[in-house]
Amino acid sequence: MKKVKVDPKGVLTGSHYIDGDYAIAEGGLAAGCRFFAGYPITPSTETAERFSERIPHVGGVFIQMEDELGSIAAMIGAVWGGKKTMTVTSGPGFSLMMENIGLACMMEIPLVIANVQRGGPSTGLPTLTGQQDMMQAKWGSHGDYEIIALSPDSPQECFDLTIEAFNLSETYRVPVFVMTDECVGHMHEKVVIPPAEEIEVVERKWYEGPKDKYLPYKLDKDGIPFMVKAGDGYRFHTTGLTRDERGYPVINAECQSVVVPHLVDKIINNADKIIMLEEDEIDGAEIVVISYGITSRVAIRAVQQARKAGIKVGTLRLKTVWPFPEKRIKQLARKIKAFVVPEINYGQIVLEVERCAAGKAPAFHVPHCGGWVHDPNDILKVIKEAAK
Amino acid sequence: MAEIRFSGFGGQGIIRCGLITGKALSLYDNKHATMTQSFGPEARGSACSSQLVVSKDRVLYPYITIPEILVSMSQEAYDKYEPDLLENGILIIDTDLVKPKPVREKIQMFAIPSTRFAEELGNRIIANLVMLGFFTAVTKIVSPEAMKKALPGMVPGRFLDLNIKAFDRGYDYGGEVLKTAKPAKTKKKTAAKKKTTKSKK
């Protein structure tokens, strides 16, 4: 993994009062994204608008595509053309992207997709919040593969984690999702963008060997294959079919047994390096509240009140949601009385908590069907119930 | 810690009020300010509001529960949001657009004909800036210098001077009003009050 300084043209150094959607665009531009293909959808449109306004000034391209299928297809092409690329969407667009997200996973394409979640299913609540695409992010396309998903809780983190998303996508050659929501997307706060020389990004893993020896899916020592730019004189093949090191289709179980474990293991075996958690007062806690995104800020109200009432509550915020922090949940399950998992859906991440806790500690879910954030009292009630 | 709600109808620049004040506080007054807004399929003319949570430290919970300052620039918004105002809070209205009920005992009310003043300055579209000047003067929650610094980028460049003029008109009027009234102070919420209203949506 080679780290390099960023192109200062994309970095809007200074303090800004912007919303999460704009911060995602600034994070992408700072990380070196120079190709944006997307289809506007509420509540993520501001990111696309910001890109369309800013990217021509930094030497990049913005394309409004015919739809979300085309968006990912264009991005895959742009990556083979040597660009860093991202797009932004919300639930309905995310559904349309799934076909080509699978292609990107199979082709091992580094790209970033921000999902500013709204209430679903279907067109649901275009203008109102939700956290209902968390499982879709993990399982949305068919077949076995792994992706990475991050969840920012503030405009500042929208900026920071978008840069991180690019770095992870380049390190592991995998699509990375920034799973935010309408509340954070439209919330305005101070966002500090550091000077360009203080931002380091992961450089794509370029192949530098002889032109006739390039194999697009031959694994390097770190398990990640090299990339080249189309048009630079390398002859190679890439496809959605199960392939060999040359990228040519090999349709048999033997080849499948190499490709699929590789797509999964390159993420799972590096989970410790990828996972970012924020913990507070976990030591000695009897209850641990696990949350992510906007819900972690709402849950804080309930946690503070529960602590006042004498309950020992710790918090664990998932900045990385996928890969899931399995090990940490297992450790905690042995020590605590119960987990409480508020999320703006009818039970998604709580299922992962339950799976990892494996019966050692129960997971109490605090559901919300979307449209608004939890009433902190609803979370408090469940914390009290769990502490009984 | 202070919770502020700006309210009025779509098209008056109510969201802009929250943005300018939030920017002024966070970038130039060394505070933390989180702005959230009503975001729906609202149209020009319907009720609209922006909310600001202001704090010395990082704002954790980003939503307002019992605002201590309510600015209302339309009757509909006033009717909708006045009942949620803290019992000893500050109410600021456009006197030509809001006919208030008898003011609750401990609430301090300040009134300004902001839209009329804006029209006198040549354009009613800057009524929100007149209101922000007035708001700045009577609440003292944000400095006028920070507010003016926050304007570039928040209002169209060619109208910057006009917006500053509008701000000053409201600010000066606020000064005059304060001479005859007791200066407003942001009041601490009592814990008891907080609990009773917590269950309100």
Image: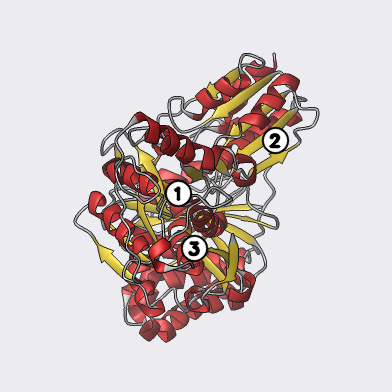
Residue holding disc 1: A174
Few, some or many residues within 10 Å of mark 2 (<14, 14–19, 20+): few
Percent across and percent down for residue B82 are 47, 46
What amino acid type should be assigned to the residue bearing mark 2?
Answer: Gln
Where residue A382 is drawn, which disc sits there?
none
Which badge, 2 or 1, is on the more N-terminal residue?
A: 1
- In the image, residue A357 sits, relative to residue A182, either above or below, namely above
Few, some or many residues within 10 Å of mark 1 (<14, 14–19, 20+): many
Give the quarter of the figure containing the N terminus of chain A.
Answer: bottom right
- Say what secondary structure mark 1 lies in: loop
Give the quarter of the figure containing the C terminus of chain A.
Answer: top right
Residue A342 is left or right of residue A50, and the answer is right
Residue holding disc 3: A204
Residue A23 is left or right of residue A128, and the answer is right
Percent across and percent down for residue A234 are 35, 66
For the point 64% across and 71% down, the residue is A198
